[in-house]
Image (cartoon, grey):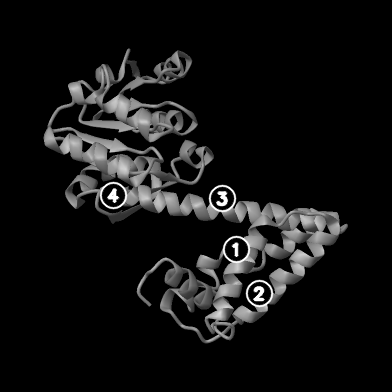
Amino acid sequence: MADIGFIGLGQMGGAMSRNLIEAGHRLRVYDIDAGAVAAIVTEGAEAASNPAEAARDAEFVITMLQVGSIVEAVVFGENGIAEVISKNALFIDMSTILPEETQRIGARLAKRGIAMIDAPVGRTSAHAAVGTSTFMVGGAAADIERAHPLLEVLGESITHCGPLGAGAMVKLVNNYISAVVNLATAEGLALAEAAGIGKGIVAEIIGQTPAGQGHIRTTWPSKALVDDPTPAFMLDLAYKDVGLALETAARFNVPLATGAAGRQIYAIARSQGRGHDDWTTGIFRTVRALAGLTE
């Protein structure tokens, strides 16, 4: 069993700390919220008065914090982790921060001979509580292998995404897609409600289509992900359907901000001759071209 310093005991961090203790690991914990620390101490952890005390003599130091500036302060600030962490220890940051922040922290630690991986967490605190989180991990393969026994306690999926910072990048993309789909879902259900259609009926239907099941598991694997433009559903039709929704929404005074912006990209795709392409491949090719990525 490992000696672990754990810093950041919010909903996610608190749940993970409990799971590590239950698995037999020894934890010294710190959070600015004394109540959060006290709650984990009742579970069997030892309290630390600052980040350095949590990290002292630990084999692994884990941070689960809100923003990159806080992570940097916890690592390099007064009474920070870097003052005491052993060169044989592994620093694991599970926070959702910018990839460049992760890389900057890692580079500064590397100058001190300290290894770091980033392992931001997918799913919610409810999954963390029962140990079914997903981890998007960046760093050296050997360091990630060292962390595997801990990550396996905390989650059911561990994906090595690339070098340090790659985990943060994948988490950023994942959360971006999730947040925007969340907004589009809210817009769509509000439109249905404004038109007198029950939310439950709409939810039942979209749960049977890519709108609810997710494109990455339904429409994209056989088309956009393999760059096949042969249409299962034409981009022209998607453009038309978004237009119909916008026209209807205007009559009911329902804002469809994501649809309005999205239709402009579909219009660009059509202007580039992709109207008869599959809607997934055509739109992906268009966005990649706008981003200056090679066709």
Residue 213 marker: 1
* Callouts 1 and 4 close, C-beta under 8 Å: no
Amino acid marked by disc 4:
Gly
Name the residue that disc number 2 marks: 239
Which element type, helix, strand or loop, lies under badge 4?
Answer: strand
Q: What residue type is labelled 3?
A: Ala
Q: Which of marks 2 and 3 is nearer the N terminus?
A: 3
Seen at 43% across and 72% down, the residue is 289
Crowdedness of circle 2 by 10 Å Cα count: few (<14), some, many (20+)? many
**Residue labelled with disc 4:** 138
The residue carrying pointer 3 sits among few (fewer than 14), some (14 to 19) or many (20 or more) residues within 10 Å by Cα, namely few
Q: Callout 1, which amino acid?
A: Gln
Q: How much space separates mark 4 and mark 2, taking CA atoms?
A: 38 Å
Q: Marks 1 and 4, how far apart in space?
A: 28 Å
Task: State the image quarter where residue 191 is shown.
Answer: bottom right
Q: Nearer the viewer, residue 119 or 97?
A: 97
The quadrant of the rendering that contains the N terminus is top left
Residue 260 placed where, x, y %? 67, 62
Q: In this view, does 237 lie above or below 24?
A: below
Asked whether residue 5 is in view, the answer is no
252 above or below 31?
A: below
Q: Along the polypeptide, which appears first: circle 3 or circle 4?
A: 4
Q: Earlier in the sequence, mark 2 or mark 1?
A: 1
Q: What residue type is labelled 2?
A: Tyr
In the rendered image, which quarter is residue 238 located in?
bottom right
Q: Earlier in the sequence, mark 4 or mark 2?
A: 4
Is 284 above or below relative to 251? below
Q: Quadrant of the C terminus?
A: bottom left
Q: Please tell me whether mark 3 or mark 4 is closer to you in this view.
A: 3
Q: Where is residue 183 drawn, in percent x and y? A: 64, 52
Q: Give the residue number, with chain letter if any, for mark 3.
A: 179
